[in-house]
């Protein structure tokens, strides 16, 4: 089936540094990818929708200058957390929509970011 | 707007017990409905889905029926196992909105 590979699975970084998270669709082309953030014991919060070759669409309240999303090809989308702070520590998950939407969505395995 | 309301957790059951996790939705049009499962430290996996009224999704002993009259999509399993311990998310996808909306998640713990 359709697989999205996300890495790294975990990362620890110092405050003020930037971290890049990658998501690759392995056996299909993902025109649209979604980036979520999940706080402990909470649901997934949609941060942004990225479309190949165009600017990402951010949800209300998400800082686009802090969470840079690039979707340069049909198989790769990246999320860069810039100038990370401890409050950015979270679980980040990417997702790609399968054909037509009715087939559902496939998710990456997630990245646990810890900013110290 | 579209929304999903899910049974609050955590839910703790003994092995072989019957499981129900309630889920209701609000949506315009005819959404597709999903249950996703998240094991500790992992991303989400699609458990089952239903794309139209009266459809029943099933997988690994879990079932859920798309009930348009009650706007519900309750998850059931006749006999749970310890390995079913995870967080379960009910979700809907409105193709017109091009996004998936999740419920708050229900943490399930199964005692041996």
Image (tube, rainbow, N blue to C red):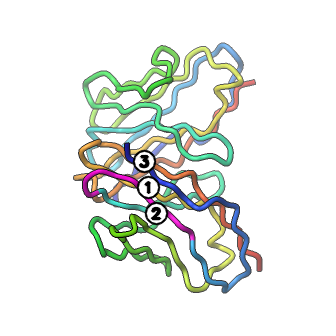
Q: Which residues are magenta?
A: B21-30
Give me the disc on residue B101: 3
* Rendered-image quadrant of the C terminus of chain B: bottom right
Instruction: Label 3, secondary structure: give it.
Output: strand
Residue at 41% across / 25% down in the picture? A69
Question: Residue at 59% of width from left, 42% of height from top?
Answer: A9
Do the residues bearing badges 1 and 2 touch, measured as CB atoms within 8 Å?
Answer: yes
Q: Residue A82 magenta-drawn? A: no
Q: Chain of mark 3?
A: B
Q: How far apart are labels 1 and 2 at the CA level?
A: 6 Å
Q: Nearer the viewer, residue A76 or A34?
A: A34
| Residue B91 disc label | 1
Q: Residue at x 54, y 58 (%)?
A: B6
The x and y percentages for residue A33 are 36, 38
Query: Label 1: chain?
Result: B
Residue A14 pos. (x, y %): 71, 20
Residue located beneath label 2 in the image: B35
Task: Give residue A110's quadrant in the image.
Answer: top right
- The answer to which of marks 3 and 1 sits earlier in the sequence is 1
Q: What secondary structure is marked by label 2?
A: strand
Marks 3 and 1 close (CB-CB < 8 Å)? yes
Using the rendered view, name the quadrant where residue A91 is placed: top right
Distance from Cα at disc 2 to Cα at disc 3: 11 Å
């Amino acid at each position: 089936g359709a697989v999205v590979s996300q890495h790294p699975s975990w990362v620890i970084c110092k405050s003020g540094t930037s971290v890049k998270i990658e998501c690759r669709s392995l056996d299909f082309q993902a025109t649209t990818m979604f980036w979520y953030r999940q706080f402990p014991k909470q649901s997934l919060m949609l941060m942004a929708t990225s479309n190949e070759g165009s600017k990402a669409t951010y949800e209300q309240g998400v800082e686009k200058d802090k969470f840079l999303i690039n979707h340069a090809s049909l198989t790769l989308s990246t999320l860069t957390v810039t100038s990370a702070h401890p409050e950015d520590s979270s679980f980040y998950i990417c997702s790609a929509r399968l054909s037509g939407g009715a087939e559902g969505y496939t998710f990456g395995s997630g990245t646990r970011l810890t900013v110290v | 707007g579209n929304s999903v309301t899910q049974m609050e957790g955590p839910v703790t059951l003994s092995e072989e017990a019957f499981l129900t996790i309630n889920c209701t939705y609000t949506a315009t049009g005819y959404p597709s409905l999903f249950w996703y499962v998240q094991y500790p430290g992992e991303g989400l996996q699609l458990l089952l889905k239903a794309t139209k009224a009266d459809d029943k999704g099933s997988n690994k002993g879990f079932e859920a029926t798309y009930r348009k009259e009650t706007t519900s999509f309750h998850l059931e399993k006749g006999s749970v196992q310890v390995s079913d311990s995870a967080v379960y998310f009910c979700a809907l996808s409105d193709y017109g909105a091009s996004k998936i909306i999740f419920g708050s998640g229900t943490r399930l713990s199964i005692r041996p």
